[in-house]
Amino acid sequence: MSNLWLPSPVLTGRAHGWLTRPGSLTAHLRQHCPAFNVLRLRQGLGQPHLDEWAPLQLVRPKRVLVREVLLRCGDTPLVFAHSITALESVNGPWRALAGLGNRPLGEALFLNPRITREPLDYCCIDTRHPLYRAAVTAVPLAPRQLWARRARYLLDGAPLLVSEVFLPGLS
């Protein structure tokens, strides 16, 4: 896959500020938009994308829990979020994922002191990347490229990979 994840983004301006903002993106979006809400698009079994194998410590494809949501301001989608973890983790450390519904995962991640977040990676994605194809279904006029970031969260040694794709409504 030619969309490579990098340790820092190569862009400037307001988009850079949102992309590299430390802490909880959910908390920052709530400050930015009083009508902040989460719309769960999908939660269930799926296959990890090829570039998700290594962060999940997979050596071959296997079914994982996939959760996809839109973080919105009113009805305007701002961020497409894609989270995955191994099924055994859903029955173990990450069992709280199953009951989130339309509540933001970001709040749960930053409230639990036992959860650690590894450094963010960044990628400019286009039609070749499955995250781009999933994210653009939420926007009427999609740009040719979108910036995304991802981080691996660890709870009792079990990884959860959270990818966030920044949509045009956030600019």
Image: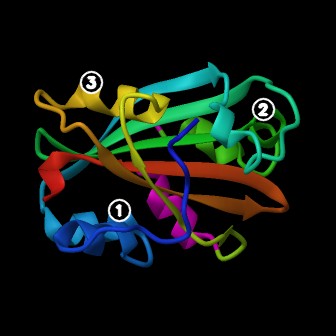
Q: Is residue 78 left or right of residue 89?
A: left
* Left-right relation of 47 to 69: right
| Mark 1 surroundings: few (<14), some (14-19) or many (≥20) residues within 10 A | some
Label 3: state its secondary structure. Answer: helix
Up-down: is 122 above or below 133?
below
The quadrant the C terminus occupies is bottom left
> Contact (CB < 8 A) between labels 1 and 2?
no
Q: Is residue 103 visible to us here? A: no
**Could you tell me residue 32's position as x and y percent?**
16, 68
**Disc 1 to disc 2, C-alpha distance:** 25 Å
Marker disc for residue 166: none
Give whichever of 102, 33 is nearer the camera: 33
Q: Amino acid at mark 1?
A: Thr
Q: Pick whichever of labels 1 and 2 is earlier in the sequence.
A: 1
Is residue 78 among what the camera can see? yes
- Residue under the point 83% across and 47% down: 57
Within 10 Å of disc 3 (Cα), the crowding (few <14, some 14-19, many 20+) is: few
- Of the numbered discs 2 and 3, the one sitting upstream in the chain is 2
Report helix, strand or loop for mark 1.
helix
Say which residue appears at 37% left-offset and 65% top-offset: 25
Query: What residue did someone put label 3 on?
Result: 137
Front label number (1 vs 3): 3
Cα distance between the residues tagged 2 and 3? 27 Å
Magenta segment: does it hold 84? no
Residue 87 tag number: 2
The disc, 1 or 3, on the residue closer to the chain's N-terminal end is 1
The residue sitting at 66% across, 30% down in the picture is 48
Residue 26, numbered label: 1
